[in-house]
Image: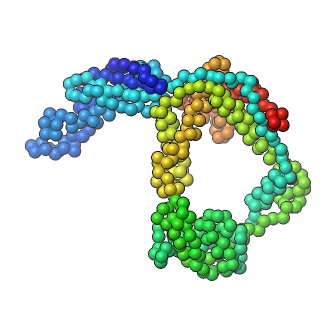
Amino acid sequence: MNVKVENMEKNMAKLTITVEAARFDDAIQSVYRKKRGSFRLPGFRKGKAPLAVIEKIYGPQIFYEDAFNEIIEATYPDAVKESDLFIVSRPEIGVETLEKGKDLVYTALVAVRPEVTLGEYKGITVERTEISVSDEDIEDKLRDELEKNARIVEVEREVRQGDIATIDFKGTIDGVEFAGGNGEDYPLTIGSGTFIPGFEDQLVGVPSGGETDVKVTFPSDYGAKEVAGKDAVFHVVVKNVKEKQIPEADDDFASDVSEFSTLDEYKEDLRKGILAEKEKAATTQNENKVINKAVENAEMEIPDAMLDSQVEDMISNYRMQLAQQGIPFDEYLKMMGKTVEDLRKDMKPQAEHNIRTSLVLDAIQKAEGIEVSEDRVDAELRRIADQYKMKLEDFMKTVTDSQRKSVKRELEIQETIDFLVSEADLVDPAASA
């Protein structure tokens, strides 16, 4: 195999890969052995027709495409290594020569990692994120804790705001049922805004075991376009009503849910917890401010192919996240009234921000010679093992070289961020006004 590299404009490169004729011929033989069982020709038992006979009947190109794909899979990774390029996109494959008995020649158009020209990154001035815990913050947190400890009790009365009504419903538009308009045993929290505007309010006052017709209009921008903007009627049966019984905020509650005997002590502990959360959030915000300023000060040219690859990776990850929640990707797009192209467009700014940030942090790490030792990597792996409550020796057996390198990179990037923040001038808002 021979690889020729041609550097192009805008951080693009073209690899021209030449594969020996014998290797392409071997690939054709490989495909033939895999697929000959699907050919039934006169005079031959199924799967026994010679390659030459099949090529004579169907043409010599019958196995070219599959053989070419085998060659790509086998040779492209080696071609990348031989090129000595830092490739950051999926290849755009082209065919130069594809003929039995001749060298196979194909091209791969790829994006190459851009060079970064760093601007000012030491001594950056940013406004420090202020931290404070108000009485309102504490009361909100206390209210959340009371909600968490509420009892759900079935009651024999009419529906009120905040209740959980178990309902059956059947929707129609102009007297005709429509897809997604029916449901049974649905637990609807009144006032949650889960259903179409106006739906939940019309259930208030309906007794447990009662029925009613709810009249609503679907929003014009509703995800399911076939019902968007249309008037609908839902026949609803309220099967039962449950209410939340929220405990009193007193010393008894404090002693039940914590190690403290008084409500005042419990509130002080809540304050400390809120403060810790805000400090952690402020640290992240301060880091992002410094990083963003360093990125703004740097110069680089992002190739379109690199950006497209990042967007596709983001969509792939999003698709997996939805699948883990049991939501089919196509149904999600339909519900949101979007196409895949819309999603690509939405994600593109974030994808570009991610790429620029990563490139700048890598460049600063290299410029400052920031590295972490293998001992530091081992310590981090021990921490992860403890987090998952695994014995270190068992956990280490699961860690691949690639994963270890990934952990090392994450540590070095965090060291770089810590360095940037330590060199930055974080000023109080009043001082910068």
Report the coloring of the rendering: rainbow
Q: Toward which corner of the image does residue 287 lie, by quadrant?
A: top right
Does residue 181 lie above or below 313 as drawn?
Answer: below
Residue 341 in percent (x, y) is at: 46, 46
- In this view, the residue farthest toward the front is 433
Inspect this view and state whether residue 427 appears: yes
Q: Residue at x 38, y 28 (%)?
A: 108
- 289 displayed left or right of 184: right
Inspect this view and state whether residue 362 appears: no
Residue 299 in percent (x, y) is at: 59, 25
Q: Toward which corner of the image does residue 3 lie, by quadrant?
A: top left
Does residue 259 lie above or below 103 as drawn?
Answer: below
Taking depth in this image into account, of 323 and 105 the one nearest to the observer is 105
- 9 displayed left or right of 42: right
Q: Residue at x 56, y 35 (%)?
A: 352
Instruction: Work out which quarter of the rendered image holds the N terminus and state it.
Output: top left
Q: Residue at x 42, y 20 (%)?
A: 7
Q: Residue at x 29, y 25 (%)?
A: 105
Taking depth in this image into account, of 172 and 125 the one nearest to the observer is 125
